[in-house]
Image (tube, grey):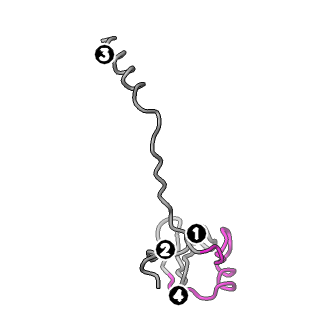
Amino acid sequence: MPRTALLALLLSLSAPLAAEQILIPLGQQGGGDIALPARGDAKGQVLERFGLPDQEHPAVGKPPITRWDYREFSVYFEGERVINSVLDHRPRQPAEEQH
């Protein structure tokens, strides 16, 4: 048994120590020029700053989580406070398709 373990160790050390690194670019969500509601903002603050949402989803779960959808982003509320704001995904067209 010790010979098998030694052989396995020697074989693993003889493998190349370099590995190819593959970078996969992540899509960017917007250019950072869109201001989003901040965590902790009240619903009233969001309404004053961004207006009425395009769509308002009813509360789900406990604690109740509500979602408001705007043209470019969605806002998630727990009760009356923002817990998260996210940009909607807009797939980019490949460079050869852009004209």
- Nearer to us of marks 1 and 3 is 3
Pointer 2 with pointer 4, Cβ within 8 A: no
Callout 1, which amino acid? Glu
On screen, residue 19 versus residue 34, left or right, reads left
In this rendering, the answer to whether 84 lies above or below 12 is: below
**Quarter of the N terminus within the rendering:** top left
Residue that numbered label 4 is attached to: 54
Callout 2, which amino acid? His
The image quarter in which residue 35 lies: bottom right
Task: Determine the residue positioned at 40% across, 25% down.
Answer: 14
Residue that numbered label 1 is attached to: 78
On screen, residue 6 versus residue 71, left or right, reads left
Residue that numbered label 2 is attached to: 89
Mark number, residue 67: none
Numbered disc 1: secondary structure: strand
Q: Earlier in the sequence, mark 4 or mark 3?
A: 3
Chain part drawn in magenta:
31-56
Q: Residue furthest top?
A: 2
- Number of on-image labels: 4
Numbered disc 2: secondary structure: loop
Q: Earlier in the sequence, mark 2 or mark 4?
A: 4
How far apart, in angstroms, are the residues tagged by discs 2 and 3? 53 Å
Q: Earlier in the sequence, mark 1 or mark 3?
A: 3
Pointer 2 with pointer 1, Cβ within 8 A: no
Residue that numbered label 3 is attached to: 4
How far apart, in angstroms, are the residues tagged by discs 1 and 3? 59 Å
